[in-house]
Image (cartoon, rainbow, N blue to C red):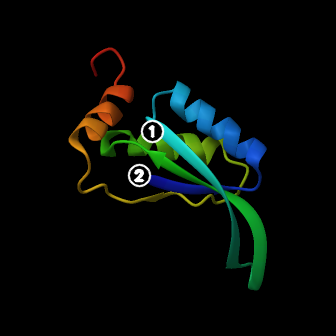
Amino acid sequence: MVLTTCPNQQEADTHARAIIEKRLAACVQSSPIHSYYRWDGEVQSDPEVLLRIKTTDEHYQALEQYLKAEHSYDMPQVIQIPIENGLTEYLEWLRDETTVNGQ
């Protein structure tokens, strides 16, 4: 699973749809959040939209490249969290949905 944040729902929706269409992930979930962080030496606070991107390890590099190229942030959060276990049928669906032409 990969986590990223977007500045608004419109950008989150654009990325979620593109990620699914490109088969970089099987599912993208979005949730409104409020982030606190240090940037340029100052504490910042902003509303954001968190994307939880369900993908496979094999698709991480392509997903990271997509986010670096298309994201509006200068340095987007792109964090991979390994999925160690899960319902077998769900994990098979995830692999099937990220497979293009049997690859």
Where does the image place residue 79, in percent across and percent down from the top left? 47, 60
Quarter of the image with the C terminus in it:
top left
- Residue bearing mark 1: 62
When the figure is inspected, residue 80 is found, relative to residue 42, above or below; the finding is: above
Residue drawn at (61%, 49%) of the image: 30
Q: Nearer the viewer, residue 42 or 19?
A: 19
The answer to whether residue 99 is left or right of residue 85 is right
The answer to whether residue 98 is left or right of residue 48 is left
Task: Mark 2: give few (<14), some (14-19) or many (20+) Cα within 10 Å.
Answer: some
Secondary element under disc 2, as helix, strand or loop, is: loop
Task: Mark 1: give few (<14), some (14-19) or many (20+) Cα within 10 Å.
Answer: few
What amino acid is found at the position of numbered circle 2 in the picture? Answer: Met
When the figure is inspected, residue 19 is found, relative to residue 99, above or below; the finding is: below
Where does the image place residue 93, in percent across and percent down from the top left? 32, 32
Number of numbered discs overlaid on the protein picture: 2
Where does the image place residue 80, in percent across and percent down from the top left? 41, 57
Q: Nearer the viewer, residue 73 or 92?
A: 92
- Residue bearing mark 2: 1
Residue drawn at (27%, 17%) of the image: 102
Labels 2 & 1 near each other (Cβ < 8 A) = no
**Sooner in the amino-acid sequence: mark 2 or mark 1:** 2
What amino acid is found at the position of numbered circle 1 in the picture? Answer: Ala
